[in-house]
Image (cartoon, grey):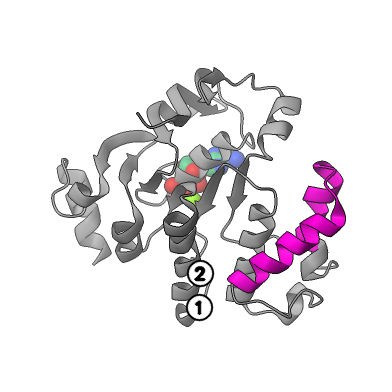
């Protein structure tokens, strides 16, 4: 039996009076890649942000390793060390070097030994093709390089889950593939547990174990990846896939 890392149960979220997420249910098993697909405005980012404690929710529950999360800010601060997130906009600190960006949270928040983290960071930088960039500043890097640093920064916390929200959406087309390959390698090589929001259907089809198809804040489909792209269950998902071609 595969271990369940995350479970979401009947999650409802409102912005004021308006309900953005409706009765969300799904689970994420160790090593599994779930891709979250759906039209713009369907609630994908809101769901990811909720799973990272960046948004509150009004009812339902999130379980981490079978334990219901107490949604207090302090608790989320702890959990966020285990659930890494990378956004569309790289959000690197512009006044810090690449290495300083990476070391900040592991050293300041996790209180880990700086020399140890530095060694890991150097290895990660090498892995994503950024050997020799430790002392560069974000402004000196291309979009693709900045996004690789953002991925390394999240990985340096040794997270159990990675959440990726359209991480290639702001990149020049020639940068996209390289960043996707890093995510694919994380899945294949490290068996990293991940939830990926993407508009790149080829990439999603390649990497998804399971697809959640979201519309208007509801999960319309929860379908294995190899079925979803060939034969989605709903007409709506079929239209969505056709529109992406
Ligand atoms: P997606 O990532 O699928 O494009 P989002 O999660 O960003 O969708 O947004 C879902 C809906 O929630 C959209 O209608 C959006 O306008 C709305 N929304 C997002 N953030 C906020 C917010 N902070 N306050 C109010 N409405 C929001
Ligand atoms: Mg979004």
Foreground disc of the pair 2, 1:
2
Q: Which residue is mark 2?
A: 179
Q: Residues within 10 Å of mark 1 (few under 14, many from 20)?
A: some
The image shows a total of numbered marks equal to: 2
Residue 205: horizontal and vertical position, in percent? 28, 58
Q: Which is more toward the observer, 159 or 43?
A: 159
Give the residue drawn at x 67%, y 67%: 123
From the viewer's perspective, is 77 left or right of 18?
A: right
Give the residue drawn at x 77%, y 74%: 134
Say whether marks 2 and 1 touch (CB < 8 Å): yes
User: Which secondary structure class fits the magenta region best?
Assistant: helix
Range drawn in magenta: 101-127
Q: Which residue is mark 1?
A: 175
Q: Which picture quadrant has residue 236?
A: top left
Give the residue drawn at x 46%, y 73%: 176
Q: Quadrant of the N terminus?
A: top left
Residue 72: horizontal and vertical position, in percent? 70, 22
Q: Which is more toward the observer, 146 or 184?
A: 184
Between the C-alphas of marks 2 and 1, the distance is: 7 Å
- Is residue 226 found inside the magenta-colored segment of the image? no
**Residue 92 in view of the camera:** no
């Amino acid at each position: 039996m595969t271990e369940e890392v995350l479970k979401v149960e009947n999650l409802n979220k409102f912005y004021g009076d308006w309900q953005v997420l409706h009765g969300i249910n799904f689970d994420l098993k160790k090593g599994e890649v779930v891709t979250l697909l759906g039209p713009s405005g369907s609630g994908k980012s809101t769901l990811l942000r909720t799973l990272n404690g960046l948004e509150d929710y009004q009812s339902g529950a999130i379980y981490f390793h079978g334990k219901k999360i107490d949604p207090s800010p302090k608790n989320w601060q702890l959990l966020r060390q285990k659930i890494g997130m990378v956004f569309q906009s790289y959000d690197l600190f512009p006044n810090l070097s690449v290495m300083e960006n990476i070391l900040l949270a592991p050293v300041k928040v996790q209180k880990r030994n700086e020399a140890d983290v530095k060694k890991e960071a150097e290895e990660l930088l090498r892995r994503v093709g950024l050997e020799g960039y430790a002392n560069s500043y974000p402004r000196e890097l291309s979009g693709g390089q900045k996004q690789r640093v953002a991925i390394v920064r999240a990985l340096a916390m040794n997270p159990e889950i990675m959440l990726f929200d359209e991480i290639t959406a702001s990149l020049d087309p020639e940068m996209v593939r390289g960043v996707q390959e890093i995510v694919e390698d994380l899945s294949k090589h490290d068996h990293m547990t991940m939830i990926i929001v993407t508009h790149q259907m080829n990439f999603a089809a390649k990497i998804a174990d399971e697809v959640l198809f979201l519309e208007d804040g509801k999960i319309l489909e929860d379908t294995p990846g190899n079925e979803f792209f060939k034969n989605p269950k709903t007409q709506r998902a079929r239209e969505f896939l056709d529109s992406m071609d």
